Amino acid sequence: MKCFSWNVIIASLIVSPLSCCQAFSLSNTSTSRRKSSSTTTSSTGSGFNYMYQNKISPTTLVTTTRSASQFDITNRLFSQSCFSTSSMIRKERTRLQAIIDLDFDDEEDPETIVPKVYPQRWVQLGYLSLLALVSDWVCFSTAAAPSTFESAFGHSSAGLIDMFLFTNVFSCFLVTDIVAKVGLGRAIKGASVLMGLGCLLRSGIPLFMNDGLVPYEILVAGTVMVGAAQPFFQCTPPMLSATWFASDERATSTATAINFNQIGIATAFLIGGNMATDSVGLQHYFELITVLSGVLAAGTVLQFQDKPPTPPSSSEIEKLLKGEEEPPFFESVKKFFKTPGFTKPLIAFICSISITNIVGAFIDEVLERGGIVDQFQIDLAGAGFELAILIGGIVIGGYVDRTKKYKKVTLACLLATVFFVVPLGLTDHALGQEPILLVLSLLGLGMAAGPVQPINAELAVDVTYPSDETAVESVQQIGGNLISALLVPVAELMSKQDYQLLSFNTLLASDIRGDVVLLTLIALVTMVYYSGFDAPLKRTIADCSDDGVCSAPELNMKMNANGDLILDASNGSVNGNDDADSVVSVDIAKSLREATKKVQEEVEVKADK
């Protein structure tokens, strides 16, 4: 409890809107009786109200002892609330309670308001990543043994995967509103339990009361339950990163959580291909997944948390002080597509997920064409491809965290994607099959194409700040899954086509598969469209003092004669429109740069002495 008087205010607000003025009077009386030793806690309250009304950056504000002017500001705020409606007062009460609950004590200077990160963030990331892994493992659990599955159930493995994916897309439309209503913690806990129950339906009770494989209808029901749970693990990584991770950790965190599902696919091929050799092995395989998902669900329920005591970045503190309330999902979607710069990262995300999904779907044919025919070797190469996606996302995402070079890195990754995808379908007649070159190209493609997804998930959140991160990622997942699903049959048709190259030259003559031509065109078209990206990084501007990137050119920060920030490309003012969010970010950026400059000057003076 930071200050008793503030809790008195909140209690009075709960009783009646008309008691607001009385509450403030009681607050002043209680505070005046405190000794001077309690200045820190009482000053925190007035500092917050001053900061909230004047939109001063939390990272640069240093609270001081209560003054008459601050009492006047606080008095005006609560006096105005006396004449507000009950709903408005409830909103103010919720915001004030959230502010009071924050842990703003700094060891060196307890009166300085600073963002903080907590070790629990790695626990959060670990659980969300493992949940994503298991969910995609379930999705592709039978892909490595389609003949065994068909002989046991009389249905195709591909049909079961389609049911999972369609359920996934439908659930993506719901996940944003559910998370906004119940919170991230409850949503993830509920989804983990739903996935565990779905796995239990698929296998029956492991080791007990189990006479064999469950009926196909029960298997489908369990699969649909896991498919409905998966978007809660796929669409929330940007929100988890924003809620728990510092501004120079977010891209790495998002890359880990988003791409960890690729490890689930690799696990399905490696373990499923070895265990599901007959109906008995298939049953034990399903039981193993059930046990692991049950343990994971139990750990999630016990250890996964909603949010930290203090936001990890200035942008998150700003959202809290402004009392941001996220609109329904479809309203958010309309707003996104009106936001400058949003469609560029969306197209890049769709390009990346389409290429990786298509290569993964036809990886057997790709490798067999290059001379790799042993099934275990194919499974290893496929697992290596999925692992390369994860590693590439972590490594390249870490670089973007430090530099904020979203555009340059994405364009470089797309160019590398073109370079690595061509050898997958190209056969040089003089050289013949080159298995080593093929595997190296496959791993390089994973390292290049995979990071485009998390990087542009973070970029989309950045340009739409202070939007709902889950809504942003839901739009990208829906678009990526739908477009890639439409492209898979097109790629399958084109894979049967071979195009001759340089047939007139014996040494250089070669041929290339049609599906590789399709993927190359997708990457090239995306590069051309993405090269036009030039939008303000609103969240990075709000956070720039947290990680020392205020002077980075990627922020498009340039001052005009009026002291406003302008965009480099069009020379238009960022705060020259009606978007109040941009205005706040610009004001905060100015204060952050001024504060940073003052601190640097003080450090230089001390160094000279």
Image (spheres, rainbow, N blue to C red):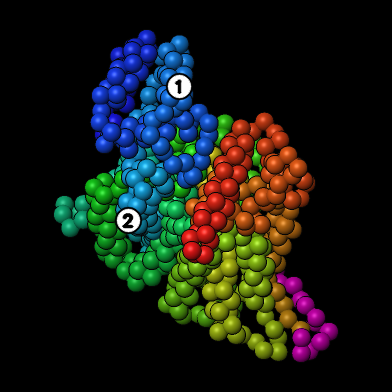
Residue topped by disc 1: 72
Residues 568 and 203: in front is 568
**Residue 72 location (% of width, % of height):** 45, 21
Residue topped by disc 2: 119
Residues 173 and 574: in front is 574
Earlier-in-chain disc, 2 versus 1 = 1
Residues 601 and 276: in front is 601
Q: CA distance from mark 2 to mark 1?
A: 40 Å
Q: What amino acid is labelled 2 in the image?
A: Pro
526 within the magenta span: no
The boundaries of the magenta stretch are: 492-508
Q: Could you say whether the residue bearing mark 1 is in a helix, strand or loop?
A: helix
Relative to 433, residue 528 above or below: above
**Residue 124 location (% of width, % of height):** 34, 52
**Residue 291 location (% of width, % of height):** 24, 57
Asked if residue 93 lies left or right of residue 455, the reply is: left
Q: Residues within 10 Å of mark 2 (few under 14, many from 20)?
A: few
Q: Residues within 10 Å of mark 1 (few under 14, many from 20)?
A: few
Asked if residue 355 lies left or right of residue 380, the reply is: right
Q: Which image quadrant is residue 281 in?
A: bottom left
Q: What amino acid is labelled 1 in the image?
A: Asp
Total marks in image? 2
